[in-house]
Amino acid sequence: MIRQVGFTLLLLALSASPATLAQQAGDRAPTQNLDTVRVKGERSESRGYRATTLRSSTRTATPLRDVPQSVSVITHAQIADQAMQSMSDVVRYVPGVTMGQGEGHRDAPTMRGVSSTADFFVNGMRDDAQYLRDVYNLERVEALKGANALAFGRGAGGGVLNRVTKEAQWMRTGDVSLEGGSFSHARGTFDVGNALSRRAAARLTGMAEHSASFRNAIALDRAGVNPSVAMLLGSTSLRLGFEHFQDRRTVDRGIPSFNGAPLAGATRTFFGNPDENRSRAFVRSGSAMVEHGAEGSVMVRSQLRFTDYDKSYQNTVPGSLIADGTQVTISAYRNDTRRRNLLSQTDLIAKRSTGPVRHVVLIGAEVARQATDNFRETGYFDGAATSVRAPIDAPTIGTPVTFRQSVTDADNSALVHVVSGYVQHQGELGAHWQSTLGLRWDRFAIDFDDHRSGATRSRTDALVSPSAGLVFKPIDALSAYGSYSISSLPSSGDQFSSLNATTETLAPERFTNREVGLKWDARRSLAVTVALFQLDRTNTRANDPNTPGRIVQTGAQRSRGGELGVTGDVTSRWKVAGGWAVQRATIRRATASAAAGATIPLVPYQMLSLWNRLQLQQRVGAALGVVHQGRMYAAIDNTVTLPAFTRWDGALYVDLSRQMRMQVNVENLLGTSYYATAHGNNNILPGAPRTVRMSLVASP
């Protein structure tokens, strides 16, 4: 089956005729009004799977085939066709990206062997708190792979996920959808907007959902609303937005393992006390963006974003089974986090020509303040024991839990100040050569207060992040590129939740990405991409073999692999999205958590996906998708393996009238039994059985 789908991808890649290539080779786009091009692009991409331009990677509007790195863009059309509702849904058809179990309460992607909960962005601005995001207000999601510090700052070692929100436009939008389905699923969304005048426009998106799960005792309630306005004041535009999002759910820690595999026969079973497993997240954000000038000459863009994250969860957690497999150990804890982010970015973009060379120069600065409070408590069963054992045939318990601090629980606050400056030059020499050279400097300063011990620690790092890319275009439709980039992560980690006597002295980890690739517009609406990469992670912590208890930074990790992506319209009636990824991520030199040669968890050797949407008649469409994921390890000790699986999805689309359409999505058509992901050896998430969702969408 894998060979058949892989062969299909290759056929798509070879589907352009020589005549088409010849036409594209001689096609030199004439100079057009930039505003008109922008509006047409938005309308086209809203209906199709293929994106044509990208701003987040280079911070300038750049044709996607001229961006010297691997990027997967999931457009609004693909999000709607697949009835996506979470970031896990978004990355399902993105080659080389897996989503971790995230302890049942947070997004945790692994990209190129690097797991992170902080490499999320909204419209290019940091969104680094730990929660589960929705997609109700998104125009598209961009998965940028490899080290991305030049555009995004610290971290971003394996890649980033950038959410681009729907914004007020000078065109009418109007969609209201009601959705219901398996496991008591009920969801409604709306998206309405229009021009208020020639100089003002407004838009409002919203969502509410109440659902259960195929897993016992699981419930979810979430809601969000996102108004935005846009104003034109001569050559200056102003955009304002606000979002309130809340998520309440049962924390599902999954199932344990036994004898190196997920525990058999426990797909629906809840381990622990479901009454004690609760999570709530409130996210409130406000944003403002001002643009002055025109993209064809000199433009200044400035963004300001404030976000208040209020996150709390408590849970009972399954652990290891006892030796004979008859009982499971269950522990508990509670964690509260409050974070306030204030972020400011300003870019100056200038375009000039000197003889045959065209230049795009970017000069920018970023200032950020992030204040975080962490408070953790241990769970005591019946007010006394920190763990209990439950019989494996009845692991859902009702034992009450009292939460209070133990001597090792966190009670701290962190204050981070970041000042950044960056410069980038994009050069174009004639019709065939392009280059991108950039350098970013970050001053990352953290003050950490441990309220338990009274200790106050601080550290300041200067992070230098270069980036370089070279693109060769033998014809307009084909680009060959090579790139080199570096990112760094300070020793306080993704969430800067701990800074102790050891980590205070450690230098930042370093991520070095080398990549070559091809990007081919096989047709005007069909893009094929190929990338080969090597990502090295160095300066990781290791135990000193000569001095017990001493930490040294000699550990190293390497990820190597290749990706093939296909996105767009094969014909006017056939849309596709998917890809094939092959990668190895291993420990090269021993770290504090793994020996040399260990395989990084949640990195399958092979991933393959292909979504096909066919327009069968004028008012009837259908889709068929396949996802294959190779076997992978649940944890870095490589003792528990999640088996490989292949899953089929489908959909039916019927236009009932010009204003009403019906959509039915079926996930896991064949009812395949599989294990989707994990968070360690004993928090394994089973995949859902056949799941049906039906929606009605009204477009007044």
Image: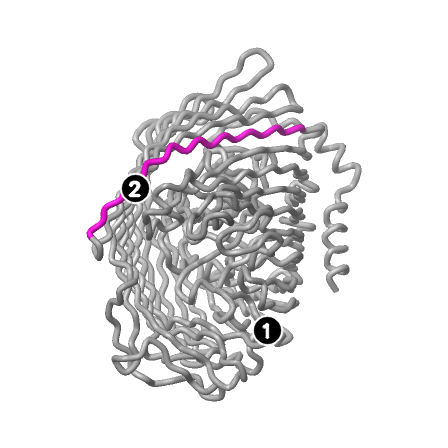
Q: Vertical placement of 265 versus 479: above or below?
A: below
Q: Amino acid at mark 1?
A: Ala
Horizontal and vertical percent position of residue 379: 30, 73
- Position of residue 123 relative to residue 694, above or below, is above
The overriding secondary structure of the stretch rendered in magenta is strand
On-image quarter of the N terminus? bottom right
Residue visible at 34% across and 49% down? 496
Q: Does residue 48 show up?
A: no
Tell me the residue at 41%/43% (across/down).
Answer: 123
Q: Residues within 10 Å of mark 1 (few under 14, many from 20)?
A: some
Q: Nearer the viewer, residue 394 or 674?
A: 394
Q: Residues within 10 Å of mark 2 (few under 14, many from 20)?
A: many
| Left or right: residue 75 compared with residue 153 | right
Q: Does residue 533 appear left or right of residue 688 in this picture?
A: right
Residue range in magenta is 454-472
Please provide percent x and percent y for residue 622: 63, 64
Query: On residue 261, which mark appears?
Result: 1
Residue at left offset 34%, top offset 64%: 247
**Residue at the disc numbered 2:** 446
Lower sequence index among marks 2 and 1 = 1
Q: Which residue type carries mark 2? A: Ile
Q: Is residue 449 visible?
A: yes
Residue 363 is left or right of residue 431, and the answer is left
Q: CA distance from mark 2 to mark 1?
A: 41 Å
Residue 653 picture location, percent across and down:
57, 65
- Queried whether the magenta region covers residue 452, the answer comes back as no
Quarter location, residue 518: top right
State which quarter of the image contains the C terminus.
bottom left
